[in-house]
Image (cartoon, rainbow, N blue to C red):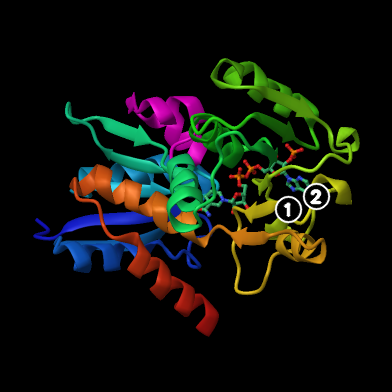
């Protein structure tokens, strides 16, 4: 039997993951005895590997690309926010011994915007780029902050319309295709597409931002992402990347597992320095 509680991030690929860096620091800071590793597993082996981890005494997993939807399906119990997101990024042992699935991405985004960057959303016009898992997970927390309106734009516009159907009871929400975006500036533009990961930029008309706009890319990198570069070129007030979202979603997972809320500011500072150092 392991004396130290075991946790890991499971994904494919996963070697690049910053989660061990973050959780190891959370544990040291809060005096929690745990170890946190990485598990690289292809989709066809996900279920068996994940179940073995828990059968052998593992306490919790962070789930990343491409397994979040399968983890959702395999969870025997779901938190309300995981149900809304239809994706699971955190697995824990439920009180009845089954698998509890949670999704902390949206809460992580909201905390990063509000607490780390002091971006207010109440009464603001928000444009959300993308309609994949990250966008779905962000919708309820963002609408809970009461923007005056929120527009979802996606290449496959049907996916954006599906999100509007699911979430429209929570706020003023609409869906458009990129060609339908008019030259009307938004206060906040959040990139929840996977475009940055491929070094690409969604087809954005220049007039959707002005010098008061804030742009936020959920993706993060050592250099500015194409979306952040685009935003700077248009002279926006601020262009931000999602490293803080990563740390904040990790803190939410840590809290679910350990019932202790770590201090994120010092870990975000350490992670930013590590990323800069390469
Ligand atoms: P998904 O694969 O679920 O969704 C991808 C989305 O991106 C779809 O809406 C897709 O549009 C769109 N897309 C992909 N390429 C392009 C492109 N070239 N131009 C325009 N749209 C494009 O990905 P996720 O939702 O899981 O992840 C989205 C992003 O969020 C990633 O960059 C990921 O790294 C980031 N993320 C960051 C986190 C953090 O902690 N900082 C946490 C979770 C995610 P279509 O439907 O038309 O194909």
Q: Is residue 257 above or below residue 235?
A: above
Name the main secondary structure of what is drawn in magenta. helix
Say which quarter of the image contains residue 79.
top left
Farthest-out residue, bottom: 277
Residue drawn 51% across the image and 61% down it: 243
Instruction: Tell me the SS state at disc 1.
Output: helix
Label 2–label 1 contact, CB within 8 A: yes
Q: Is residue 255 among what the camera can see?
A: yes
Say which quarter of the image contains residue 124.
top right
Say the numbered circle drawn on residue 12: none
Question: For disc 2, does the CB lie below 8 Å from ligand 1?
Answer: yes
The stretch drawn in magenta includes residue 247: no
Decide if residue 229 is on the left or right side of residue 239: right
Q: Earlier in the sequence, mark 2 or mark 1?
A: 1
Instruction: Tell me the SS state at disc 2.
Output: loop
Question: For disc 1, does the CB lie below 8 Å from ligand 1?
Answer: yes
Residue drawn 49% across the image and 53% down it: 118
Q: Position of residue 262 (x, y in %)?
A: 26, 57
User: Which residue is tagged 2?
Assistant: 202
Q: Is residue 102 above or below residue 222?
A: above
User: Which residue is tagged 1?
Assistant: 195
Decide if residue 144 is on the left or right side of residue 235: left
**Cα–Cα span, label 2 and label 1:** 7 Å
Decide if residue 212 is on the left or right side of residue 179: left
Work out whether residue 34 or residue 163 is closer to the camera in this orientation and state it: 163
Q: Is residue 21 among what the camera can see?
A: no
Stretch in magenta: 68-88
Work out whether residue 221 or residue 263 is closer to the camera in this orientation and state it: 263
């Amino acid at each position: 039997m392991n004396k130290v509680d075991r946790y890991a991030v499971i994904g494919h690929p996963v070697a690049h993951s910053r989660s061990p860096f973050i959780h190891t620091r959370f544990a040291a800071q809060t005096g929690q005895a745990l170890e946190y590793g990485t598990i690289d597993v292809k989709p066809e082996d996900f279920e068996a590997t994940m179940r073995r981890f828990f059968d052998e005494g593992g306490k919790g997993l962070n789930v990343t690309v491409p397994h979040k939807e399968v983890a959702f399906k395999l969870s025997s119990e779901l938190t309300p926010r995981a149900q809304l997101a239809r994706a699971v990024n955190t697995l824990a042992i439920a009180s009845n011994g089954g698998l509890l699935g949670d999704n902390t991405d949206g809460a992580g985004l909201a905390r990063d915007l509000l607490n780390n960057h002091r971006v207010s959303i109440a009464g603001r016009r928000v444009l959300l780029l993308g309609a994949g898992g990250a966008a779905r997970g962000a919708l309820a927390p963002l609408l809970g902050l009461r923007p005056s309106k929120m527009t979802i734009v996606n290449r496959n516009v049907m996916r954006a319309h599906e999100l509007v159907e699911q979430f429209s009871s929570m706020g003023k929400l609409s869906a458009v295709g990129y060609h339908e975006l008019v030259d009307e500036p938004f206060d906040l533009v959040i990139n929840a597409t996977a475009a940055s990961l491929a070094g690409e930029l969604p087809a954005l008309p220049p007039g959707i931002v002005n010098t008061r706009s804030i742009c936020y890319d959920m993706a993060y990198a050592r250099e500015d992402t194409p979306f952040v570069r685009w935003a700077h070129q248009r002279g926006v007030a601020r262009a931000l990347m999602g490293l803080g979202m990563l740390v904040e979603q990790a803190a939410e997972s840590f809290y679910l597992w350990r019932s202790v809320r770590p201090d994120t500011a010092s870990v975000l500072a350490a992670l930013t320095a590590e990323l800069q150092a390469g």
